[in-house]
Amino acid sequence: MNKITAAITAVGAYVPDYVLSNQVLETMVDTNDEWITSRTGIKERRILKDKDKGTSFLAIKAAQDLLQKSGTKPEDIDMVLLATATPDMPVAATAVYVATQIGAVNAFAYDLQAACSSFLYGMSTAAAYIQSGRYKKVLLVGADKMSSIIDYTDRATCIIFGDGAGAVLFEPNEEGYGLQDEYLRSDGIGREYLKIDAGGSILPASEETVANKQHYVFQDGKTVFKYAVSNMADVSEKIMSRNNLSHDDVDWLIAHQANKRIIDATASRMNLDDSKVLVNIEKYGNTTSATLPLLLSDYEHQFKKGDNLVFASFGGGFTWGSIYLKWAYDKK
Ligand code: UT7
């Protein structure tokens, strides 16, 4: 029997309707379209306005989009993994609710949290379950309602993040398509630079933590930027060299959409032509766990069977890494 690899066989996505543009942000904080565009590449982001809806709403929509487009029966799914930094609630995994709501009645489910690298790490986890031969259909969803943890009076963070979700299905492949190699890293020195201080076991919620705005994202942008640029480029270069991939062999760079300048720096280190560098940050901003699957969904029609995709991400923690995957299908 041939070796089993884990291939992506379907993609789905969802973003909320409400568009928060740079122009509207200009009316909320001391910022301007020129600064945001030149420093980040972002023009607008989507926000889930409904007060009673959480990340599960986004995840369910993306999963349903995948099921509908691929004709997959939800009862055939073995496992639902939800990559997210903004679960519906601190306890009771959001993935479990998502699985039940989409009708994945034969699946088990759990959440995976590694900040902006949640989806990349989730790809590794999903692929490992498939490669082991234990499961046949693993649904990986990346979803975040970032607007639930952003202070819209803080110009250092509110211009960056947006809400969204994407989903992929991993299945066994015996022709060699799918995940080929991964290089994943983490370093705990990073937790001082990108974090939410309160609401966890060190600093539980209190009147004081709310008054001090400690339930919102804090980011030391300059420091995170510095680490992101060097680490994302390092791992992408590493995955290329150890798989003997030249810049001609790489068809697409699927990089976490945190800042256009970080994506450009990574692409430049890989010596990649701009046409191979997928970007949608201008439309969605940084959607944390959803950036990679949203890219897959937006560009799926351009991928050809056998294309070499290099994924790269960097996030809070710090967490980062790169994955090399061979695309498994031509879109009909
Ligand atoms: O996804 C997880 C990982 N996260 C990242 O990878 C994010 C990494 N960091 C970044 O993308 C960038 O650091 C930011 C986009 C967050 C900030 O860009 P920057 O070029 O690093 O700006 P800065 O923080 O160094 O600020 C430069 C100037 C400052 O003014 P002065 O001190 O030079 O007078 C800021 O006060 O820009 C000012 N500034 C702003 N001005 C207008 C900061 N934020 C804003 C703003 N609008 N929103």
Image (cartoon, rainbow, N blue to C red):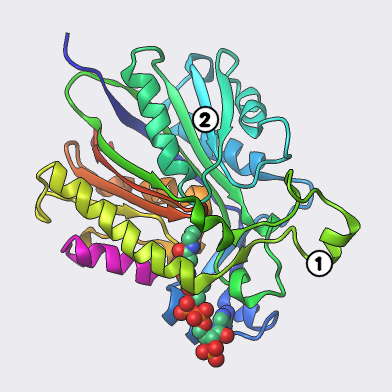
Residue 50 location in percent, x, y? Answer: 75, 52
Left or right: 301, with 292 as reference point: left
Whichever of callouts 1 and 2 sits on the residue coming sooner in the sequence is: 2
In the image, which is nearer the foreground, mark 1 or mark 2?
1
- Disc 2 residue lies near ligand 1 with CB under 8 A: no
Residue positioned 47% across, 70% down in the render: 223
Magenta span main SS:
helix
- The residues colored magenta run 259-274
Residue farthest along the right direction in this orientation:
207
Residue 227 location in percent, x, y? Answer: 40, 64
Quarter holding residue 121: top left
Residue positioned 45% across, 36% down in the render: 122
Residue 179 location in percent, x, y? Answer: 27, 33
Name the amino acid, label 1: Asn
On screen, 98 above or below 12?
above
Does residue 126 show up magenta in the picture? no
Q: Is residue 36 visible?
A: no
Camera-nearest residue between 54 and 111: 111
Q: Is residue 94 visible?
A: yes
Quarter holding residue 124: top left
Camera-nearest residue between 106 and 15: 106
Does residue 266 show up magenta in the picture? yes
On screen, 221 above or below 49?
below
Q: Which residue is mark 2?
A: 81
Residue positioned 25% across, 49% down in the render: 302
Residue 212 circle label = 1
The answer for how far apart the CA atoms under marks 1 and 2 are is 34 Å
